[in-house]
Image (cartoon, rainbow, N blue to C red):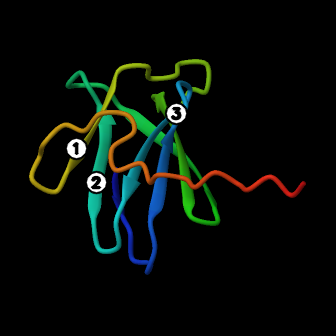
């Protein structure tokens, strides 16, 4: 499943059930798929502000979650969880 960030800010690609995150810069594209060949994978996607959450199911069966998946960039390089995760500033103490 290809995912492309057509927006002007960072976009989080969040893969369940492990809660792994991959961050796309504007204009960047990643592909999500099963690690093993020959699996008929259906994707369930949820979109919220600056985040896309994806579940992978074998044969569309929600009881058969695909646990072994890969996320690759446009060049085919495999990405690790936390790829390009932005640094978050600490919130100042209001006291």
- Residues 19 and 42: in front is 19
Q: Where is residue 54 in the image (x, y as percent from the top left)?
A: 52, 43
Which mark lies nearer to you, 3 or 1?
1
Secondary structure of the residue carrying tag 3 is loop
Instruction: Find the distance from the CA under tag 3 to the CA under tag 1.
Output: 22 Å
Residue wearing tag 1: 72
Which mark lies nearer to you, 3 or 2?
2
> Which of marks 1 and 3 precedes in the sequence?
3
Q: Which mark is residue 60?
A: 3
Of all residues, the one furthest to the bottom in this rendering is 8
> Which of marks 1 and 2 precedes in the sequence?
2
Residue drawn at the location 44% of the way across and 66% of the way down? 10
In this picture, residue 21 sits left or right of residue 92: left
* Cβ atoms under marks 2 and 1 closer than 8 Å: yes
Residue drawn at the location 52% of the way across and 22% of the way down? 65
Q: How many numbered badges does the structure rendering display? A: 3
> Which of marks 2 and 3 precedes in the sequence?
2
Quadrant assignment, res 48: bottom right
Of all residues, the one furthest to the right in this rendering is 95
Residue wearing tag 2: 30
Q: How crowded is mark 1: few (under 14 residues within 10 Å), some or many (20 or more)?
A: some
């Amino acid at each position: 499943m290809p995912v492309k960030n057509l927006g002007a800010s960072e976009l989080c690609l969040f893969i369940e059930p492990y809660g792994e995150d991959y961050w796309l810069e504007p204009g960047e594209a990643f592909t999500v798929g099963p690690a093993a060949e020959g699996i008929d994978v259906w994707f369930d996607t949820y979109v919220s502000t600056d985040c896309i959450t994806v579940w992978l199911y074998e044969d569309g069966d929600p009881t058969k979650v695909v646990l072994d998946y890969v996320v690759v960039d446009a060049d085919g390089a495999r990405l690790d969880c936390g790829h390009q995760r932005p640094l978050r500033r600490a919130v100042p103490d209001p006291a």
